[in-house]
Image (cartoon, rainbow, N blue to C red):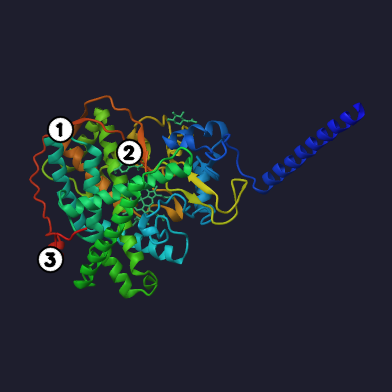
Amino acid sequence: MDIWWSLTADVDKICLLLLMLILSVIYLWRNRLSDIPNGPFSFPFTGNGKILQDKPHINLTVLKDQYGRIYSIKLGKQRAIVVCSHEGIVEALIKLSPKLCGRPKMFLPQGFFKGNHEAGVCFSELNMKYKIKKDFVLHSLNSISCSEELSDVVMNEIQGVIALLLEKKAALEILPLFESIFLRLMLYIVNGKLYQGDDVNFKEILRTFQYRADELHQKWLSVTSPLLSSFNQRNRTELIERTQLQFEYQRDIVNRHKDCFNPDIISDVVDHGLLMLERYDDMGELDQSELDTLFIELCGTGYRQLASTISWLILYIASFPNIQHKVYTELISVIGKERLPKLSDQPNLPYTTAVILETQRLASVMPLLYPHITVEDVTFSGFNIPKDTVVLFNVWSVHHDAKYWKQPMKFDPDRFIKDGCLHIPDHYLPFGEGLRACPGENITDVLLFLFASHIMFHVSAKLLDDSDLEGNFHGFVLTPKPYAAEFIPRETVVNDVLDIPDSRDTVCYMDGLEI
Ligand code: HEM
Ligand SMILES: *[C@@H]1O[C@H](CO)[C@@H](O)[C@H](O)[C@H]1NC(C)=O
Ligand SMILES: *[C@@H]1O[C@H](CO)[C@@H](O)[C@H](O)[C@H]1NC(C)=O
Ligand SMILES: *[C@@H]1O[C@H](CO)[C@@H](O)[C@H](O)[C@H]1NC(C)=O
């Protein structure tokens, strides 16, 4: 009996040993196959989601101290690589391009652009159509960004904003104000129609984009942490219905452009689209719905980043009166007090420009870019990363790394100035890098320069409460928390009379279209 007992116990032990051996072999084998970087312990199902819920850019930056500047985390079941070094970003987005330049589909909410993820640019796969669309977007935005007409319209809008800042004082909510202004400008750039702020159609368009950003954020929460997320079916349905209406509205705008199309007068993105359709065969590969998606996407990608950047800029200058004073001094010494700053002044205003660059570095309004995905197996930084691995580029981390910047947490525009001239280091990447980089960079530079220089020319800002400088991460954009500021007019005697062209839409468009 005794012998029988000890024998079964041994069999148990042997089985256990064998099992452990098999498991270790499988473990080692899998590790050998996908030789991915190390990372923090992750829970089954939720993965590392908890660290990505609230301030993902900060939590992902803290982890680099423990795991190095390239490590891996788990988004639910999905493995993701996090890149926190400039060298890593350059290798991934330039040297190995386009292997790490895909876009994961899983971050897109249901009903986003009628469920056709391929239609726009932002979330499209890398294929021939993507190339045609991206080239078109780059070309049309760049040619509009240097038009004088845009500059005049923008300057006129700014006069309105400044009047508002001075009138409403502390009661003003800065971020929503600028979101509304920049969306109106983007709608003007794309559709050629300049809405009044209280226009019914404009308000509906703004609401629709807000729903889209909310849903994008909900999706981020549910992908990063499937067990923690909650979602609102009513919002989802609302977005789907609103998207349907928005597409009908956009179709109507395109048709109106067609009715009065003149290839000699190309002024907005829709005109550029029609011209391309007429002249180039490859645009013909895009169907109507893809073109509409492209136009709608262009109206909506960018205005939140622009509004956030200007809100951060006001918050920073209000926090540092001496910097504000230095900008004002530069402005009046170059421009005088009798005319308004204009785009051609920018090369003579290095300090003013440096304040904008430093705002974009310190704020890093798109701290993780948009998520990328590997489109094939790739050896990156010595690791073997399999196809379909999500890659997050933590630009916030690069922008706040003492390895690249002296006293990175300090707001110090002078870091962008060398021997009195503007100097932009390579590790400054607010627009991303390579194939997927932001096509709106040049038009953004124009808009930010005009807004920032005019605001600092006309008013000084004073902070009315102790605002913390940490932002909210929502729909991939980092915005400042609400803050109260007071605006005091500068003594400028401007005699400039702006020559604002009649809004083109008064010729061609009918108002009151229901959306
Ligand atoms: C302060 C302003 C802006 C900032 C900081 C910004 C930043 C970025 C960043 C970081 C990306 C992602 C790059 C990547 O994932 O690798 C991006 C993509 C994109 N941005 Fe911007 N952006 C701004 C304004 C705009 C504007 C005004 C437009 C349009 C008119 C625009 C259109 C786009 C598009 C279409 C993409 C997707 C590109 C692609 O996937 O190929 N952005 N932007
Ligand atoms: C992530 O960040 C939040 C807020 O910044 C913090 O409360 C939380 O403890 C962090 N989580 C981890 C795992 O570091
Ligand atoms: C639903 O939409 C409302 C209004 O936009 C928003 O306040 C709320 O946070 C949304 N809920 C979810 C779960 O997204
Ligand atoms: C911005 O403009 C410069 C000079 O015109 C051009 O070389 C560059 O490609 C443009 N960048 C983008 C993102 O359009």
**What is the crowding at mark 3: few (fewer than 14 residues within 10 Å), some, or many (at least 20)?**
few
* Spot occupied by residue 20 in the image (x, y as percentages of width and height): 75, 37
Reading the chain from its start, which is encountered first: label 1 or label 3? 1
Placement of the C terminus among the 4 image quadrants: bottom left
Q: Which SS class for mark 2?
A: strand
Q: Which residue is mark 3?
A: 507
Q: Which residue is mark 1?
A: 169
Q: Which SS class for mark 3?
A: helix
Q: Which residue is mark 2?
A: 479
Q: Amino acid at mark 2?
A: Thr
Q: Which SS class for mark 1?
A: helix
Is residue 465 found left or right of 227 in the rendered image? left
Is residue 357 found left or right of 197 in the rendered image? right
Residues 375 and 337: in front is 375
Residue visible at 27% across and 38% down? 311
- Above-or-below relation of 7 to 307: above
* Spot occupied by residue 271 in the image (x, y as percentages of width and height): 25, 66
- Are discs 2 and 1 less than 8 Å apart at CB? no
